[in-house]
Image: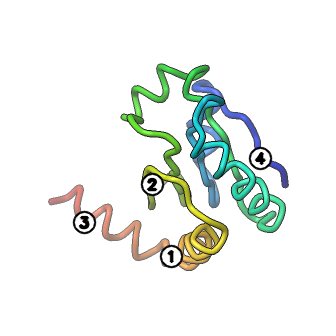
Amino acid sequence: MATIAVTEAEFGETIKDGIVFVDFWATWCPPCRMFGPVFEAASDEHTDAVFAKIDTDEQRDLSAALGISSIPTLMAFRDGYLVYREAGALNNKQFAQLIDQVKALDMEQLKAEAEAAKAG
């Protein structure tokens, strides 16, 4: 699966189900251009996940709402839950390890912990 461009209007629906990796980037950003091919290659290899790209220049309101202050910023979601967020470019090996970790998460445990935290 190739990467998909996501807008503010599509963001909520995109992250709602399954495994989703989101790359916040801009064309003028050298580290973003370095990470782009890594992200694209992973999208081809891991067809069981969604790989979304958000251009921070085109989606300023969404980027601001999510507190994106450095790019590239990578987020990972499982079934609508944010499970990873970090600024900075990853190499192939680092990104592959992150993908494996996100896939291995025990979502029932994560959801139970989130509910317990809400109940407080």
Gap in Å between the C-alphas at discs 2 and 3?
16 Å
Marks 2 and 4: in contact by CB < 8 Å? no
Give the residue pinned by disc 4: 3
Q: Against 107, is 59 above or below?
A: above
Mark closer to the observer (4, 2):
4
- Could you tell which of marks 1 and 2 lies nearer the N-terminus? 2
Q: Secondary structure at mark 1?
A: loop
Gap in Å between the C-alphas at discs 1 and 3?
18 Å
- Could you tell which of marks 1 and 4 lies nearer the N-terminus? 4
Q: Secondary structure at mark 3?
A: helix
Q: Secondary structure at mark 2?
A: strand
User: Looking at the picture, how far across and down is residue 15, in whole percent?
Assistant: 59, 47
Q: Which mark is residue 105?
A: 1
Q: Nearer the viewer, residue 33 or 106?
A: 33
The amino acid type, in three-letter code, at marker 2 is Leu
Q: Against 93, is 48 above or below?
A: above
Check disc 4: other Cα within 10 Å, few if <14, some if 14-19, many if 20+. Answer: some
Q: Is residue 88 left or right of residue 58?
A: left
* Figure quadrant of the N terminus: bottom right
- Could you tell which of marks 1 and 3 lies nearer the N-terminus? 1
Q: Nearer the viewer, residue 36 or 46?
A: 36
Q: Secondary structure at mark 4?
A: loop
Mark closer to the observer (1, 4):
4
User: Which image quadrant is residue 29 in?
Assistant: top right
The residue drawn where x is 62% and y is 38% is 13
- Could you tell which of marks 4 and 2 lies nearer the N-terminus? 4
The amino acid type, in three-letter code, at marker 1 is Leu
Gap in Å between the C-alphas at discs 4 and 2?
19 Å
